Image (spheres, coloured by chain):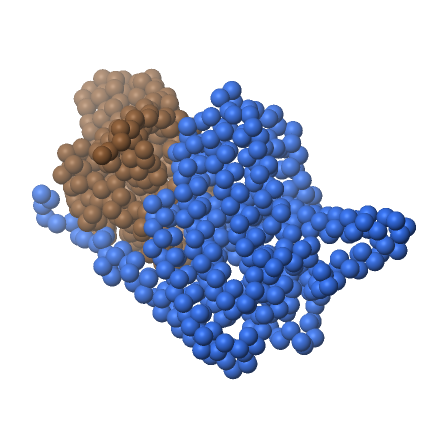
Amino acid sequence: MALPSESITINLGPQHPSTHGVFRIRVTLDGEVIQDIEPIFGYLHRGTEKLAEERTYTQIVTLTDRLDYTSSMINNQAYVMATEKLAGLEVPERGQYLRVLTAELQRVASHLMGIGFFLQDLGAFGTPLMYCFRERERILDLFEMICGARVTVSYMRPGGVNQEPPPEFWPDLRDLLLDLPNYIGELERLITENEIVVARTKGVGVLPRKLAIDSSISGPNLRASGVPWDLRKADPYDIYSRMDFDIPVGSNGDSYDRFLVRVMEIHQSLRIVEQCVQQIPDGPVRADVPYFFRPPAGDAYAHVEASKGELGFYLVSDGSIAPYRCKIRAPSFINLTALTEMLLGWKVADLMVIFGSLDVNMGEVDR
Amino acid sequence: MESNTLFSNLNEIYLGLLPESLSWAAFLGTGFTIILILVNALLMLTAFGTYMERRVLGRFQTRLGPNRVGPFGLLQPLADLLKLIIKEDLRPVTADRLTFFLAPVLMVTSMLVVVAVVPFGNGSFLADLNIGVLYLVGIPTIATVSIFLGGWGSGNRFALLGAARAVAMLISYEVPMIVSLAGVLILAGSMSLVEVVEAQRLPFILLQPLAFFVFIVSASAEMNRSPFDLMEAESELTAGFHTEFSGMRFGLVQLAEFGEVVITSAILSTLFLRGWENPFIPSDWQQVLPAQIWFIGKVLFFMFIFTWIRATLPRMRIDQVMAFAWKVLFPLALINMFVTAALVVVWPDPNPTYTQLWVMVGVNWTVAIGCLACFTRGLERHGKKPTASVQLVQMPAEVS
């Protein structure tokens, strides 16, 4: 005879050590099991899309940095591709290679942060987090060399990139490319086969393949559910069609697969960076574009494979120096669509694991 | 009493200072002096231990620990203490006054009184109870009760939830802890801690590897330390039984927790590493260092081991924790007890020769490694590598 029990609703507030930013979630629990959730976000809404209507096309690049602040370069890349489509600009080759190089380095940095915080949520008291951040620091030092800023880089411009990297950039990059694969291999051996990590993440928070496709999930979350979809291969932009790399695809769609897909993507990104370094031609880094350029009236949509998923910019121009409308398709926001189905039936302790494995960034969700 | 040389020495000093009629005062004075030494040493080790843990954790994480307050950050525990003392002591309206007050007090008290039986030198202890080991495992149970008192008395449903989980975990882990000690008791033939140390011709870590492993894991769980620290985990929803404690009340809970680490290290070094003696050479040879130095060294060594484990391993979930206690640790402890008993039946002489001891070592280590191998294989899922679930592909021509 089952005893009747009441459900309680608790609030995992916007300030919490593991919500990856200001994310609020109200969870209805029956004992330890999650019955229902209600995610509440918007705590980081800064009106990016409205602000974009009052800034010139070049100024909006600084706004895009702050969307997913862990992958600024890629945000820049998506936006400037949209402006180039709008204005019909041609990007010189060296500019394209530099874009791909910095975007892939940024992907590595973003995944390192995602992995580090995922392991932190699992309770590995900060040790893997510190190790991941130590390597991320080296990448951020490279960014500082190339454009002066570590996190909100604003490196790309409509027509190319802002400036040529200084001569000391290339030797440091080469050192990083030698060290980082060994380091990631060490991390793989220590963490990915750790009994406790496996026990807590295998089979937890399964995102079935059909649900993933129906909910427009993209990025590593989609690939972990078994769908081999990567925009860099499906719809190549810049010079990705010349790059030789693989995409890791999971089979179960659980938290472990999402975590492991990110680890393996770091290796592939480093492969791309190496090929860029070998193949990069000389030449200008930016097309000759006036500061106040007025694209013809019309619209354009450009999408890239950001570190969290498909990041798209839809720009509508009315012929003036600022866009009429800038709509951002934020991957983290859309990835949260399936959160309820993924969390139902799991225990409270798994909530943080599943949410951490999704690797959402509130800067993108709220814009 | 005759082997308590520290007591007799101090007693003589006091008797020399006091007149004949106050000889009872000398007795009391000696007792209190030893208590002073023990409690002070314990609390200083706890304070120093918190500093050491933060530095060591920092070094494990490729960063420095606290190094600002005082030379090398050595005054950091003092700074923490001052901060906690000057904080406002909040008590929720829904809290039950008596239990809210008693919970941290009981935790600290139960931690402090354990040190009464631990011998920290040759003939230096407060009381050599002939049921010393029973005392050791009985007193920390009060800490379990006080955790529940704290959770219930806070008047906060999350604290109660966290406390209930904590108590379930703690009483599950007491069973393997006690059964693993049974092996040590069989070999020592007595529950008195001084006798256990003296019976260790070879340190029991060699003779009882399974018991050591089970005890160190169960003790980690009893102390709510990683990888079993889900009670106070920041990334868990319920903040544990000490949610509503602030200021020095919280400070007492932290003190009790880290004091338990020191106590458990002391117990481990007494029961498994020959307490105050040089563990590497027989006890009738010249001990290279004074007994107290050996003891403190071993306590610090075990504290470092606990910190190392905390820095390395992530946290387990509550149901995995319980499964681990009942399905893995308890059978291992039982197997250890039976093997030890069988060996003692074969060689019932309470003073076995070294040859017999080394044969026992061999048998015990074989059994230990065999059991752990079997249990690990039982835990593995289908024998496949976990990383096999993610493959590298080239993009197929079309995606369905």
Q: Which residue appears at 57% of the width and 77% of the height?
A: B351
Q: In the rendering, at what x and y percent does residue B352 appear?
A: 54, 78
Chain identifier for the blue-coloured part of the image: B
Q: Is residue A25 left or right of residue B14?
A: left
Q: Is residue B333 left or right of residue A365?
A: right
User: How many circles with numbers are drawn on the protein?
Assistant: 0
Q: Which residue appears at 62% of the width and 69% of the height?
A: B198
Inspect this view and state whether residue A316 appears.
Answer: yes
Q: Nearer the viewer, residue A170 or B168?
A: B168
- Seen in the picture, residue A326 relative to B323 is either above or below; the reply is above
- Seen in the picture, residue B133 relative to B397 is either above or below; the reply is below
Q: Which residue appears at 30% of the width and 58% of the height?
A: B379
Give the quadrant of residue A95: top left
Q: Nearer the viewer, residue A96 or A101?
A: A101
Quadrant placement of the C terminus of chain B:
top left
Look at chain A in the picture and name its colour: brown
Q: In the rendering, at what x and y percent does residue A113 appear?
A: 39, 42
